[in-house]
Amino acid sequence: MKTSCELIRDLLPLYYDGICSDTTKKIVEEHLAECSECSLILEKMSVSLKSTNSVRQESEEKIFGGVAKKWKASLCKSFAKGILLASLCFILFYAGRYGLCQANFIAADNNVVDTTEYTLKDDANNIAVVLETTDGYLGGTIVSETDEKGNVYLSIVRPIIKEKNRDKDNLRVVYTVNIENKNAVYYGSPDNRELLWDKNTDLPQIAYEELQ
């Protein structure tokens, strides 16, 4: 019994994909050997499927290529943001550390600073002030401010977080103040001050070398 072309053409996709039974495969091949029309359909089917697969592959490559580019760009942006954030944290950390532990801007209270004042020999325009802390903390610098009345205010300034001196030594600073055209010299601020010298104060004389 001869198999009809209609049935063979229904079986061609299964035959082309290789998922039909051996019996079906034999029937299809016997028919194709005798039927040029069905053989031509199989050839067209092969060309069509190859073309479809090629288009699909190109489409997938474009899609995945675009996704890969976007992912790479996103990764680069994330990496750059990470570097920027890490740098910012690093800067903030060291800026905070410097501000808390190294920057001197907190004035030492009057009650933790002992002062000794001298008139310098052979130098009528300058006096020497020895400032010594008594709380055992390290570090600090001296600052001087002069108001419009000719009053000089001295202060020892230190960081917020101070380092305790294990040897219990005190900070000692020798500071020379020019008193020419000055009214008075104080330790502290205008609101909380201790007089060190004014025009009516007689101070003991000393050579600057003796203070070192």
Image (tube, rainbow, N blue to C red):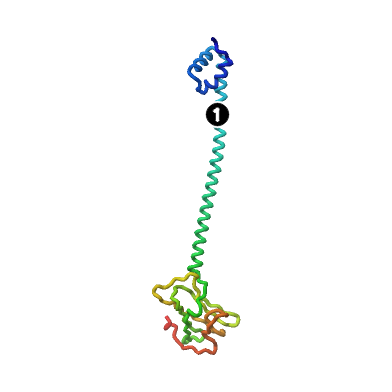
Residue drawn at x 55%, y 40% is 67
Where is the C terminus found, in terms of image quarters?
A: bottom left
| Residue 206 position by quadrant | bottom left
Q: How many marks?
A: 1
In the image, taking residue 183 as reference, residue 205 lies left or right, namely left
Residue drawn at x 55%, y 84% is 184
Q: Which residue is mark 1?
A: 53
- In the rendering, at what x and y percent does residue 35 appear? 55, 13
Residue drawn at x 43%, y 72% is 164
- 150 and 62: which one is in front? 62
Does 147 sit above or below residue 13?
below
Crowding near the residue tagged with mark 1, few <14, some 14–19, many ≥20 C-alpha atoms within 10 Å: few
Does 206 sit above or below residue 73?
below
- 186 and 20: which one is in front? 20
**What's the amino acid at mark 1?**
Asn
- In the rendering, at what x and y percent does residue 17 appear? 52, 23
- In the rendering, at what x and y percent does residue 10 appear? 57, 19
Where is the N terminus found, in terms of image quarters?
A: top right
Residue at the extreme right: 148
Residue at the extreme top: 1
Mark 1: secondary structure: helix
Does 6 sit above or below residue 178?
above
| Residue 56 position by quadrant | top right
